[in-house]
Amino acid sequence: MTTQNRKQNNIKHGTIELVLLLLLQTGKKYGYQLAQELSEYSDGEYELKEATMYPTLYRLNQNGCLESEQVKVGVRRTRVYYCITPRGRQRLTDLLKEYTMITGAIDKIISRISENNPQEADDSYAEKIRE
């Protein structure tokens, strides 16, 4: 794994619960559906592998943030649908507050560093990151 991928995965790891709960607040969904919506809504920039997503769903289910229901589809297949519980909605609210606070603090740091480094005035840190 490249250093860049490792850094992206570290940031993503802290947001997995948040994005799954965000998607589930709109209704029942199964794992593949969640993965597809994450990819679609992020224009392919936020993708979750099954090995990461399902343990998070199981943990949220065990913690009472989600309920699950097995539905038979076809002769031998079942799908597990997840839906958010009141406890999950509270967890989502808490995660959104935390996310907003952290990203706001990081934005302040970036702005203040830019202000204090006039030689960097032509190139913002956000632009450098995109390169």
Image (tube, helix red, strand yellow):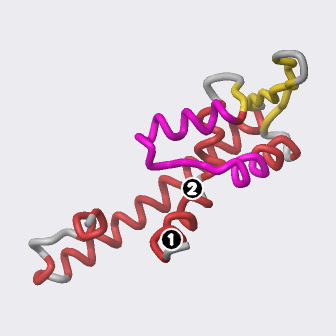
Cα gap from disc 2 to disc 1, whole angstroms: 20 Å
Secondary structure predominantly adopted by residues drawn in magenta: helix
Residue at coordinates 18% horizontally, 83% vertically from top-left?
A: 117
Q: Work out whether residue 70 or residue 120 is closer to the camera in this orientation and state it.
A: 70
Could you classify mark 1 by the number of other residues whose Cα lies within 10 Å: few (under 14), some (14-19), or many (20 or more)?
Answer: few
Residue beneath the point at 84% across and 30% down:
68
Q: Quadrant of the N terminus?
A: bottom right
Q: Disc 2 marks which amino acid?
A: Glu
Give the residue at x 72% y 30%: 30
Left or right: 105 as drawn, with respect to 16 = left
Q: Give residue 71's position: percent from left, percent from top.
A: 85, 20
Percent position of residue 102, x then y: 49, 62
List x then y, in percent, for residue 26: 61, 24
Q: Residue pushed farthest top?
A: 74
Residues rendered magenta in the picture = 32-56
The x, y position of residue 126, in whole percent, is 27, 64
Which residue position holds label 2?
98
Q: Relative to residue 64, is residue 48 depicted above or below?
A: below
In the visual, does 88 lie left or right of 120? right
Label 2 crowd bin: few (<14), some (14–19), many (20+), radius 10 Å = few
Q: Amino acid at mark 1?
A: Lys
Is 49 magenta? The answer is yes
Quadrant in which residue 114 is drawn: bottom left
Q: Residue at x 50, y 68 (%)?
A: 5
- Please determine whether, in this image, residue 33 is positioned above or below residue 131: above
Q: Quadrant of the C terminus?
A: bottom left
Total labels: the figure holds: 2
Nearer to me, 79 or 57: 79
Q: Which mark is residue 7?
A: 1
Residue 112's quadrant in the figure?
bottom left
Residue 124 relative to residue 50: left or right: left
